[in-house]
Amino acid sequence: MKVVVTGGAGFIGSHFIKYLLKRYPDYKVLNIDKLTYAGNLENLKEVEKNPNYKFLKADICDNVIEDAVDGCDVIINFAAESHVDRSIQEPETFLKTDVMGTFNLLEISRKKGVQRYIQISTDEVYGSADKDYAFSEESPLNPSSPYSASKASADLLVLSYYKTYKTPVIIIRSTNNYGPNQYPEKFIPLFITNAIEDKPLPLYGDGKNVRDWLFVLDNCRAIDTILHKGEIGIIYNVAGGQEKENIFIARKILEYLDKPESLIKFVPDRPGHDRRYSISCERIKDLGWKPEVSFEEGLRITVEWYKNNEMWWKKIKSGEFLEYYRRQYKL
Ligand code: NAD
Ligand code: DAU
């Protein structure tokens, strides 16, 4: 099988490429990535010499990728601007990449007659869930941020291509991923790396917002399951089933690193901050998938990885990103 992965130098995409090449040694993978601030080829060091792996530095909005996609069976679109706080400050790039980039990939899929177009979406498109309620794949879209609105818009386009052109699409909406190699602007890696450096952990609002955490390798297994057994034209939710308040996670990280709770600093809330994410995922469970990594185990693995890979994240934090988050949190 020839698989085009877009955004494969980012967090989830790079894990998925390594997973796929290990699990299916005869598959060929072309990674198309623009290498924005979030793309990092160091994430792919262990496969860069694999003859079945190729990399193309390109923008998914650009027509030049059309030729590169020739002869591929599947396109899996991970490429996106993915950080909610950045979307609040600079929404335009989110619309360009997340909406127009998806549009370009759909057009290419239609013209080339690819066998599967898989859109990596998010549970954020449903918006905030009331206590004890979980959204299903049939729930209405109710996004809160420019990020989630751009992802929801892309999902609608993807579904329209199925209805109008019979493009063989599938949409995957997962909960919050965490694990090694996640860019340290996201909650868990930001808090781990700040704690290692004895810097404050900026907790938004009252710290009681709830996210449902999915270890990144469990998500790779879910995408693999859907790639091979999923039904065309269908949306699949993928839930970690491990809902936690942010403050619980902040305390766990400090406990694992043996650091004081006084490092937690409550800061003003994120505008439009969704209180709780919760989804049900019976469809993918019916395909035989369930998460295998408990939150405690996954968090321990993640904390150990950041402890043992300081070079990876210190390079990032000492550069442009540091300025960005100093400005944002006024720390
Ligand atoms: P990430 O920000 O770590 O990586 C995004 C990658 O896309 C980077 O390598 C970047 O260089 C690339 N990219 C950005 N714009 C591009 C463009 N115009 N052309 C080509 N490449 C471009 O993101 P992630 O956390 O790995 O998320 C991957 C996908 O999964 C995204 O679509 C995101 O919306 C979705 N998702 C993420 C999570 C999560 O918790 N991280 C949860 C659910 C869904
Ligand atoms: O739900 C899936 C989504 O999860 C993905 O679609 C997004 O790409 C991904 O970024 C993530 O979005 P969140 O907004 O949930 O993740 P983030 O890591 O930014 O924040 C997680 C929670 O932690 C959220 O309630 C906000 C809070 N937070 C975050 C940061 C960065 C803080 O309290 N302090 C922080 O500094």
Image: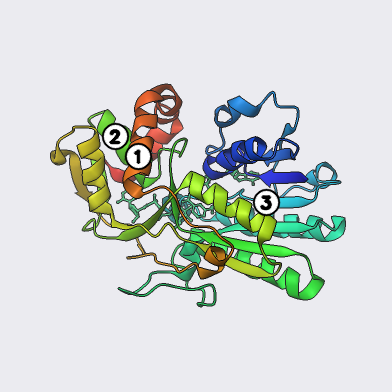
Which mark is on residue 190?
Answer: 1
Q: Position of residue 210 (x, y in %)?
A: 31, 60
Above or below for 324 versus 242: above
Nearest the viewer among 7 and 217 is 217
Badge 1, how many Cα within 10 Å: few under 14, some, many 20+?
some
Q: Quadrant where the C terminus lies?
A: top left
Q: Is residue 265 visible?
A: yes
Three-letter amino acid code at disc 1? Leu
Q: CA distance from mark 3 to mark 1?
A: 27 Å
Check contact, mark 1 vs mark 2: CB within 8 A. yes
Q: Is residue 81 visible?
A: no
Above or below for 203 versus 141: above
Three-letter amino acid code at disc 3? Ile
Q: CA distance from mark 1 to mark 2?
A: 6 Å
The residue wearing badge 2 is 194
Q: Position of residue 16 (x, y in %)?
A: 59, 43
Query: Which residue corresponds to the image point at 59% horizontal and 39% vertical from the top-left?
Result: 19
Q: Quadrant where the N terminus lies?
A: top right
